[in-house]
Image (cartoon, rainbow, N blue to C red):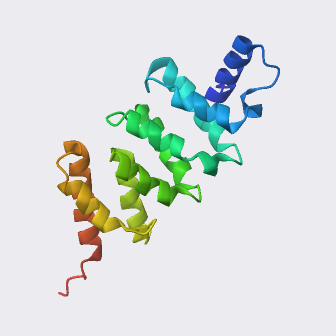
Amino acid sequence: MCESALAKYSRNESAATGALGGAMSREIRQVVADIDTLRTADGDDLLRLQALIEEYFASPDAPAHIDVWFRLYERFPDDHGHGVFWTILHGIEAQPTSDAAVVASIRRRPTHYPVLMVNRMLNGGIPAAAGVDLIGLLRQIAADERVAATVRADAEQFLEHQRDRTKPPRRG
């Protein structure tokens, strides 16, 4: 049977620190601090990230610290974490505070995953978040030359998708 990333990380952390409890007994602030110290989304840091994801989302205090994941996306704007960033996205979307955090992240530094989340909100029938029109936000991103070309292209693709979704059906 495969050992989970959390179990491996917990065992390693306990051995390294002499802690009696596993990683699950740590305070959420410690987990957030560990996420903020990640320098890559590869190798050993990827294994560590997987464990931190499990630990973070198991905490009842997770919604109050949701911005940690947007800081990660902003730190690694061209990375996909070998698919692990999708796990983060799904965890974020399950949090009640995520919509406003998505908008705040995009205002700081538009990156692929938050822009993707805007498209997913629109697909889910959410036209605005934190008082911001989401179609307008995608338009701003697509037009802003300071935003990475790949993210601008994402925004334009999502705008096209939203236009196609809202077109009335053709009558034959």
Q: Quadrant of the N terminus?
A: top right
Position above or below: 156 against 150: below
Relative to residue 122, is residue 156 drawn left or right? left
- Quadrant of the rendering where the C terminus is positioned: bottom left
Residue 52 appears in which quarter of the rendering? top right
Which residue is nearer to you in this view: 36 or 150?
36
Question: Which of 165/18 is in front?
Answer: 18
Q: Residue furthest bottom?
A: 171
User: So how many labels did they put on this image?
Assistant: 0
Q: Residue furthest right?
A: 20
Towards the viewer: 102 or 13: 102
Q: Quadrant of residue 149?
A: top left
Report whether 147 appears left or right of 134: left
Residue at x 48% of width, y 59% of height: 100
Q: Is 129 drawn above or below residue 43 in the view shown?
A: below
| Residue 22 horizontal side relative to residue 124, left or right | right
Q: Is residue 87 visible?
A: no
Residue 48 screen position, x and y as percent: 56, 25
Q: Residue at x 45, y 36 (%)?
A: 72
Q: Is residue 94 visible?
A: yes
- x, y (%) of residue 123? 39, 66
* Above or below: residue 58 compared with residue 169: above
What residue sits 46% from the left and 19% below the top?
43
* Residue 39 in picture, x, y percent from top left: 45, 23
Eyeballing the image, is 21 above or below 121? above
Query: Could you say which is closer to the camera, residue 85 or residue 98?
Result: 98
- Please tell me which residue is depicted at 64% across the width and 33% down the height of the picture: 31
